[in-house]
Image (cartoon, helix red, strand yellow):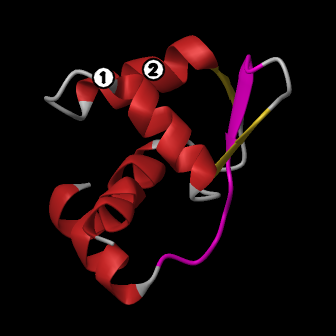
Amino acid sequence: ALQGLCLWVFWARLPASMDIGEPQVNALLKAGHLFGDHVLLRRSLIDHRLVSRTVDCTVYRRIEPAPPPEALLLIRRLG
């Protein structure tokens, strides 16, 4: 549950309503963590339905669900 909550911070850093390429997504994720596995983060964002991607995995788009209240607090503190 805590890991899922932390994904919202990465979600908030992705541009809204905009297609972005995999290199840009990777750069945003790499800049926001210290454990060295941006691929795990990218996959987790997709698994949690916070980000969608094309079948060929070249274009990503932030999905726009309403963050839960605790995620909003975390985004404000860390975003």
Q: Residue furthest right?
A: 55
Give how far across and how far down residue 74 sits, in percent.
24, 70
Give how far across and how far down residue 27 sits, in percent.
40, 18
Residue 21, can we see it?
Answer: yes
Residue 60 sits inside the magenta stretch: yes
The residue segment tinted magenta is: 57-67
- Give the camera-side residue of 35 and 9: 35
- Residue 26, numbered circle: 2
Tell me the amino acid under the disc marked 2: Asn
Disc 1 packing (10 Å; few <14; some 14–19; many ≥20): some
Is 9 above or below relative to 24? below
Q: Residue at x 74, y 16 (%)?
A: 58
- Give the camera-side residue of 2 and 14: 2
Q: Residue at x 60, y 18 (%)?
A: 22
Residue at label 1?
30
Is 78 above or below relative to 5? above
Q: CB atoms at circles 1 and 2 under 8 Å apart?
A: yes
Disc 2 packing (10 Å; few <14; some 14–19; many ≥20): some
Question: Dividing the image into 4 quarters, which one contains the N terminus?
Answer: bottom left
- Residue 75, numbered circle: none
Give how far across and how far down residue 65 sits, in percent.
64, 71
